[in-house]
């Protein structure tokens, strides 16, 4: 195929993950290539016939953890435009073309975030485009909504490998990565356009609530190294009175664990 303008960077794990990609029937789109980084800790597995296409590049690894796998994707990316993805997403040709068009229409932006559709736990989005450095209160971007120009990111930014599915902490790699892009001053915008469909609840929401609270403490230590106690208190005040002390203990346990693992080396 011709050199792609956009690469969709898909992380997957094990036999079930690669079968989800095969079943998704990703569309062929001129100028789009799918880069699949496939973790196979249980040993080498065959590539499904549906993925033996000239617009798919598949790389295998014996590692674990979605943070590490997203970094594998960055290491094997080469197109001017890159879109982060997971193995359970369903794309359309129009959705992928919309990513390319959005960058063409925003030549001054290095990072763009989008929307996704889902059949559960619908995420609320602002109805209008905005500068990511002046985002509405409460806005956050999941990894699967983030696209960027490779020239500004490759070799300069990495995902924290302590965070994500099958990692020390079950989620947060996308928050930390996105925050690092903004802290570096990369110009970006939110584009109110759904580019894919995500079936069912996310992996993170299926976790035990106590685990998620401790995880949040670790993530906020990375996002706000000095101010995390204030954020903890703000979040704790939203809990029932009888749960606030326990909530803070869980949050602090996540902070302590992140420090013991040196998750954020200085």
Image (spheres, rainbow, N blue to C red):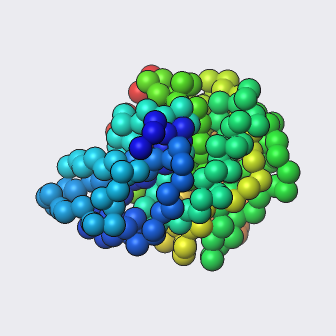
Residue, far right:
128
Q: Residue at x 33, y 61 (%)?
A: 51
Q: Position of residue 228 (x, y in %)?
A: 62, 40
Q: Is residue 241 left or right of residue 202?
A: right
Q: Is residue 236 left or right of residue 165?
A: right
Pinpoint residue 63: horizontal percent, then vertical percent: 24, 48
Quarter of the image with the N terminus in it:
top left
Residue 58, above or below 16: above
Q: Residue at x 85, y 51 (%)?
A: 128
- Above or below, 216 against 241 in this view is above
Kindly give the residue lying farthest to the left in the view shown.
43
> How many marks do you count on the picture?
0
Q: Residue 96, how many percent across, how many down? A: 60, 53
Residue 69 seen by the camera: yes
Q: Residue at x 45, y 47 (%)?
A: 33
Image height of 198 relative to 94, above or below:
below
Residue 232 in sight: no
Which quadrant: the C terminus?
Answer: top left
Image location of residue 265, percent across then percent down: 41, 27
**Which image quarter: residue 25?**
bottom left
Give the answer, above or below, for where 165 lies relative to 134: below
The residue under the point 73% across, 29% down is 107
Residue in front for this viewpoint, 81 or 117 = 81
């Amino acid at each position: 195929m011709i050199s792609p303008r956009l690469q969709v960077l898909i992380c997957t794990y094990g036999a079930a993950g690669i079968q989800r990609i095969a079943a998704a029937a990703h569309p062929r789109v001129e100028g789009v290539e799918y880069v699949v980084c496939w973790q196979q800790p249980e040993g080498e597995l065959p590539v499904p016939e549906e993925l033996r296409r000239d617009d798919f590049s598949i790389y295998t690894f014996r590692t674990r953890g979605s943070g590490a796998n997203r970094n594998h994707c960055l290491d094997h990316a080469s197109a001017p435009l890159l879109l982060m993805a997971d193995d359970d997403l369903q794309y359309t040709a129009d959705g992928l073309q919309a990513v390319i068009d959005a960058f063409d229409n925003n030549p001054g932006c290095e990072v763009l975030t989008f929307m996704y559709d889902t059949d559960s736990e619908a995420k609320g989005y602002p109805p209008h485009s905005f500068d990511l450095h002046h985002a509405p209160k409460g806005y956050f971007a999941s990894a699967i909504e983030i696209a960027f120009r490779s020239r500004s990111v490759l070799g300069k930014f990495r995902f924290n490998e302590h965070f994500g599915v099958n990692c020390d902490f079950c989620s947060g790699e996308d928050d930390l990565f996105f925050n690092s892009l903004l802290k570096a001053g990369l110009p970006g915008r939110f584009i109110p356009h759904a580019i894919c469909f995500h079936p069912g609840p996310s992996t993170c929401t299926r976790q035990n609530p106590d685990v998620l609270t401790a995880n949040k403490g670790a993530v906020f230590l990375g996002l706000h190294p000095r101010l995390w106690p204030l954020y903890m208190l703000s979040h704790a005040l939203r809990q029932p009175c009888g749960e606030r002390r326990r909530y803070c203990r869980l949050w602090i346990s996540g902070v302590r664990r992140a420090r013991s693992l040196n998750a954020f080396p200085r």
